[in-house]
Image: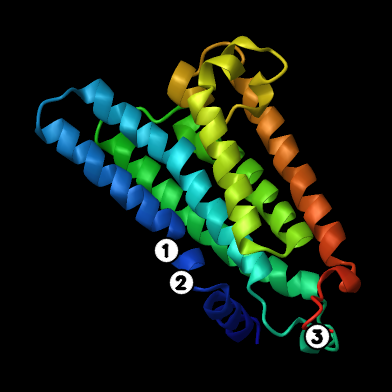
Amino acid sequence: MRLPIWLHEARRAGPAALVAAPAALLLMAIVAIAIQVTGAGHRRAELILVAGLEGVVPLAVAMAALTIVVRENCRELHLSLPTPHLVTIGRRLGVLGAITVAACVVYAAVAVVAGFRVGPGGGVLVWIAPTLWLAGFAALVAAISRSTVLASSAVALVWLGELFWAQTFVDNAGLRPLFLFFTTRLGDSPGWAGNRVGLLAGGLVFLVATAAVLLRPERLLTEEDA
């Protein structure tokens, strides 16, 4: 009985949730292979692979997460059903999370077998910490604003801001725990563990806040719904 429910929620999550992480990683793998083949350097190809895990996957997953939160077209009907709206959204985000975990684990494993280093501990915290933080942020903004445009713009602004002003985050101890690209810029140098813990904690706070918003039915209905 459970499997049909999860398959249904996977379909309802939409194509973006199913292909976001795999497509992002495939693109970065192709770029890394091209760099390696052209003789541009093993280290440069390795950096591209790490950037795929730490930078590109979080952005792709965050964009998919916000569409899951916003795209429900039958909120008024759903709020009359026994299953809470939060549970439904949680299942769809769970599908996104499961696909992301599978894709990143396979990607990192293949990279390690091929002779590349993707971060401490096989690279798990390299991708899971920034992905949780950025996806949690995206879900919260989407739940509050109920606007795909506003939420995606906020996510893009944060991601690009940290990318462009990376040195500011590196130099400022107060901002360092929020830096999404720590591994790509500094490897596993001192402060890496604190940065990962900060991102994980922030992501959990964002998800709890998102759940609190989704538990309030009046926040889910637009004027057209009502």
**Cβ atoms at labels 2 and 1 below 8 Å apart:** yes
Q: Residue furthest front?
A: 223
Circle 1 SS class: helix
Relative depth, front residue between 107 and 96: 96
Tell me: residue 59, above or below residue 124.
Answer: below
Q: What label does residue 19 carry, if any?
A: 1
Marks 2 and 1, how far apart at CA: 6 Å
Above or below — where is 84 with respect to 80?
Answer: above
| Front residue of this view, candidates 217 and 58 | 217
Graded by Cα atoms within 10 Å as few (under 14), some (14 to 19) or many (20 or more), the crowding at tag 2 reads few
Is residue 95 found left or right of 222 in the rendered image?
left
Residue furthest to the left: 38
Q: Which mark is residue 15?
A: 2
The answer to which image quadrant residue 20 occupies is bottom left
Disc 3 secondary structure class: helix
Residue that carries the numbered disc 3 in the rendered image: 76
Q: Nearer the viewer, mark 2 or mark 3?
A: 3
- Inter-mark Cα distance, 1 to 3: 29 Å
* Label 2 or label 3, whichever comes before in sequence order: 2
Image quarter hosting the C terminus: bottom right
Residue type at the position of mark 1: Val
